[in-house]
Amino acid sequence: MEPRTTAPALLVLEDGRSFRGVSFGAAGETFGEAVFSTGMTGYQETLTDPSYHRQVVVATAPHIGNTGWNDEDDESRRIWVAGYVVREVARIRSNWRSVRSLEDELREQGIVGIAEVDTRALTRHLRERGAMRVGISTTELDADALLARVLAQPPMAGAHLVGDVTVSEALVVPAEGEKRFTVAAIDLGIKEMTPELMARRGLEVHVLPASSTLDDIRATGADGVFFSNGPGDPAAADEAVALLTEVLDAGLPYFGICFGNQIFGRALGFGTYKLTYGHRGINVPVLDRATGAVEITAQNHGFAVDAPLDAPTPTRWGDVRVSHVCLNDDVVEGLELTGSDGRIRGFSVQYHPEAAAGPHDSAHLFDRFVEVLEAH
């Protein structure tokens, strides 16, 4: 049985609502944007997803930590969440791959959390009021004093965070088996499962820093370009938009996920906007408008593309249409760009087809990328 602290902790939202609990993870103080994730499993993948940079994640599942922590399922080099909020911490970790407890890992990486919080009430509050700034502290237990520091924090709207999470230098993930194509993957906050799934399909993936140029992409011998998921406001990512515009001008096939979908939308002339509380979890239904198929998807985004659902939109590269929509709220979940010759020049999805830790309904999109590369 894991030892548990009884040290008090305090959570304060920017609208003044507060919750008291006990320390979970590292002692100290942290700030970020309060968001909730509805996944019943996969907390290790969630915590190590760079898209959660500067966000305090509230787990809606009431029991967290039961599978402990292993050394295989990290989606990046570290935990990226700013803080973690749970209802109940598992007293016993039980999984054959577990090498330490979740709380031990949070302490080791200095992640401040809070447990024994009414996460149902907190989630309902965020659904009604929207994602907002938050602070968690084990050192400042006066709600008014902590609120003052919360209000001094920058908001997520307008935040340019890609530079914090991208790789510092290029790395190559070799193709498994016979190499079929080369892909330049611009790391805006990429998850490790993404190049792995491409490699399984015979793609040699060159993961490049977000600051890369079109010449850097060409130097890899890329047959196509991929833009990854990532944190922050897409409206602040002008450099990524400019690079993708050059990629499209160069005629290179494109595939984007999540942040890469938002950047694609901006490059095609659409705007983006902040959702009230976002989509975060592994159970979001998405409609493929071409086939009528519904996929249950993994998602993690607080911004979306503002594109018309009713008709294709002309661009200088061809016509773009909304290919996928969320069945919960009609948010744009995918874009498809078709050239005048009828070939797909680029496509993107707002959700995560790499879906660590699941579901895997959308893994076929990596096969589709291969088909687009073959067509070019």
Image: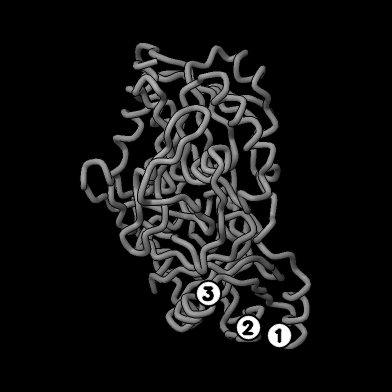
Q: Mark 1 near mark 2, Cβ–Cβ under 8 Å?
A: yes
Give the mark toward the camera: 1 or 2. Answer: 1
Please report contact status of discs 2 and 3: CB closer than 8 Å, yes or no.
Answer: no
In the image, is 137 to the left or to the right of 251? right
On the image, the x and y values in percent for residue 203 come to 42, 20
Callout 1 secondary element: loop
Residue 116 in sight in this render:
no
Q: In this orientation, which residue lies closer to the viewer: 14 or 94?
A: 14
What residue is rendered at 59% in x and 50% in y?
231
User: Element at badge 2?
Assistant: strand
Q: Residue flagged by tag 3: what amino acid is it?
A: Arg
Q: Callout 1, which amino acid?
A: Leu
In this rendering, the count of numbered labels is 3
Q: Is residue 52 above or below residue 13?
A: above
Q: Is residue 53 left or right of residue 296?
A: right
Q: What number is the disc on residue 141?
A: 1
133 to 289, vertically: above or below: below
Earlier residue among tags 1 and 2: 2
| Residue at which label 3 appears | 4
* Quadrant in which the N terminus is drawn: bottom left
Of 122 and 111, the residue lying toward us: 122
Which amino acid lies under the numbered mark 2 shown in the image of this protein? Pro
Residue at image position (43%, 38%) is 348
Whole-percent x, y for residue 160 in the image: 69, 50
* Helix, strand or loop status at disc 3: loop
Q: Quadrant of the C terminus?
A: top left
| Foreground tag (3 vs 1) | 1
Report the residue at 50% width, 54% height from top. 304
Residue 281's tag is none
| Residue 244 horizontal/vertical position (percent) | 59, 31
Left or right of residue 85, residue 162 in this image: right
Q: Judge by depth and name the residue closer to the eye, 310 or 155.
A: 310
